[in-house]
Image (tube, grey):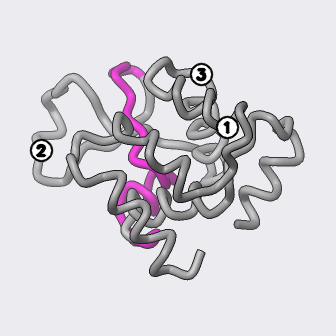
Amino acid sequence: AIQIDYVYLSVSPERQLPRKLIIAQAILESAWGKSRFANEGNNLFGIRTFDKSQEHLLPITWDPNKWPGWGVKMYSSKCESVVDYLHILNNVHAFKELREARASGVNDALELANYLEKYASKPTYVELVKEIVKEAGL
């Protein structure tokens, strides 16, 4: 949450998202901060890169000498991954409905989670995010 507060110093209020939503996604995507991608790559959100020249990690079971078409993006800090996550939700077409809901006054983490179905391929992703918001006491 401290990283979010720091990042929010330079993010206008209309581009912010509820901290509960951000933390829930970070928990889910980084296995409570324990994943290799979070620890070695400072990537709290499972953000991918499709640019082979960009620093990235591959799942440990994959051949590191073969480019599979994407890798998990590496960041210089966890704060940098929060900035990129906000950039994605604020700019990528897949999250247009989330932005529209927020602009219409929706600021509840559980409500905005409904617009995250395109964040991951897992069919139960939205429900998992909501479960974390509720169960983690966020």
Q: Going by the picture, which residue comes out furthest to the front?
A: 104
Please name the amino acid that badge 2 sits on. Answer: Trp
Q: Which mark is residue 62?
A: 2
Disc 1 residue crowd, few under 14, some 14–19, many 20+, Cα 10 Å: some
Determine whether, in the image, residue 69 is placed left or right of residue 75: left
**Which residue is at a point 39% across and 28% down the rendered structure image?**
49
Q: Which mark is residue 91?
A: 3
**Which residue is at a point 64% across and 55% down the rendered structure image?**
108
Of labels 3 and 1, earlier in sequence is 3
Q: Quadrant of the N terminus?
A: bottom right
Q: Quadrant of the C terminus?
A: bottom right
**Which residue is at a point 45% across and 59% down the rendered structure image?**
38
- In whole angstroms, how far apart are the C-alphas of marks 1 and 2? 39 Å
Please name the amino acid that badge 3 sits on. Answer: Asn
- In whole angstroms, how far apart are the C-alphas of marks 3 and 1? 13 Å
Residue 30 sits inside the magenta stretch:
no
Which span is picked out in magenta? 32-53
The x, y position of residue 119, in whole percent, is 38, 39
The residue closer to the viewer here, 10 or 126, is 126
Residue that numbered label 1 is attached to:
102
Q: Main secondary structure of the magenta part?
A: loop
Determine whether, in the image, residue 125 is placed left or right of residue 46: left
Q: Which mark is residue 137?
A: none
Image quadrant in which you'd find residue 37:
bottom left
The residue closer to the viewer here, 103 or 42, is 103
- In whole angstroms, how far apart are the C-alphas of marks 3 and 2? 31 Å
For mark 3, give the secondary structure.
helix
Q: Please determine whether, in this image, residue 67 is positioned above or below residue 117.
A: above
Mark 3 vs mark 1, foreground winner is 1
**Which residue is at a point 42% across and 40% down the rendered structure image?**
47
Of labels 1 and 2, earlier in sequence is 2
The x, y position of residue 95, in whole percent, is 50, 28
